Amino acid sequence: MKWQNFLVVTASYIFYGWWDIRFLSLIILTSSFCFVSGLLIERAEGNRKKQKIINTINILLNIGILGTFKYFDFFSTNIETALHSLGFEPDWITLDILLPVGISFYTLQALSYSIDVYQKKISACHDPIAFFAFVSFFPQLVAGPIERATNLLPQFYKRRTFDYNKAIDGCRQMLWGFFKKMIIADNCAMAVNEIWGSYQYQSGFTLLLGGLLFTFQIYGDLVSVFPVQKQAENKADNFGGFFVNQPKILVVGVFDISVWGFGCDWFSARPLCADTRFYFLADVPCVPF
């Protein structure tokens, strides 16, 4: 089992580091913070105040890394632009670094583990190889969805054996995912790019058709990955699916994230309008203490 997990970690790190090996240090750092935090929280059993401090420090460290690499240049550039518009000439600092692929996914997935340990929803992991495999698992590393530790981590504690029937079903599901991406999404994208590239010369009907095709393009791009991912793990259905709300002729994307409840929801999902079922996902964790 450990060799299986070691192979998963090795393959995941090769997959992630192939783009830029320097960013491997971030996923290793995030994984280490959360793994050690889980052990410290378990060791501080009975001392809720100490557990709270450990959990808070771990959250701040990981959100700090995420904020620095994902949002620092964004806010820095916009503040500089705003000050320029007011007549100021600030000598502003920007990091000018590439955004690490999938940093939001693996950061929040790792945090889900330490928060679950803090809230006693899962026992602390004592196997670093299994935990690092959980955080870096390559089928969902750069595209999500974010998986709860209570669902995915226990799968790395079990020995996996080949099952012919599951393999056949997996290949069938993967082909269905490839069909959605390569046949539906990619072909819709060619028409959409042509329409939007000269939208000022198009008729109203053509623009409406472009909007409809774009809907199917997004549908194909988003949901095509899930049948492929599901064959690699027993995934919780975090990302629901797209469907057409026929009475209102609305194309709706529903993110089923009730599984992320921590007393408060890990992500907040709320309806935009009272008479529709369109939800949006707020990328802000709400963590109760």
Image (cartoon, helix red, strand yellow):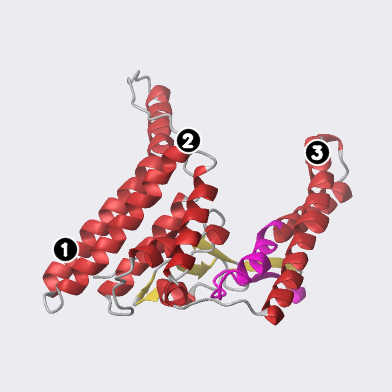
Determine the image quadrant of residue 24. Answer: top left
Q: Secondary structure at mark 1?
A: helix
How many numbered circles does the render carry?
Answer: 3
Q: Note whether 160 is above or below 145 in the view shown.
A: below
* Residue at figure coordinates x 35%, y 18% from the top left: 89
Quick one: label 3, few (<14), some, or many (20+) residues within 10 Å?
some
How far separated are the C-alphas under marks 1 and 2?
A: 32 Å
- Point out the residue furthest to the front here: 3
Q: Which one is nearer the viewer's eye here, 6 or 183?
A: 6
Q: Choose the circle earlier in sequence order: 2 or 3.
A: 2
- Residue at which label 1 appears: 53
Q: Choose the circle earlier in sequence order: 3 or 1.
A: 1
Q: Choose the circle earlier in sequence order: 1 or 2.
A: 1
CB-based contact (under 8 Å), mark 2 and mark 3: no
Residue 253 visible in the snapshot: yes
Q: What's the residue type where badge 1 is placed? A: Ile
* Residue at figure coordinates x 48%, y 77% from the top left: 159
Q: Position of residue 219 (x, y in %)?
A: 71, 61
Q: Secondary structure at mark 3?
A: helix
Quick one: label 2, few (<14), some, or many (20+) residues within 10 Å?
few
* Residue at figure coordinates x 45%, y 53% from the top left: 104
Magenta extent: 221-247
- Residue at which label 2 appears: 98
How far separated are the C-alphas under marks 3 and 1?
A: 55 Å
Q: Quadrant of the N terminus?
A: bottom left
- Residue at which label 3 appears: 199
Q: Position of residue 129 (x, y in %)?
A: 38, 63
Q: Note whether 161 is above or below 127 in the view shown.
A: below
Q: What's the residue type where badge 3 is placed? A: Tyr
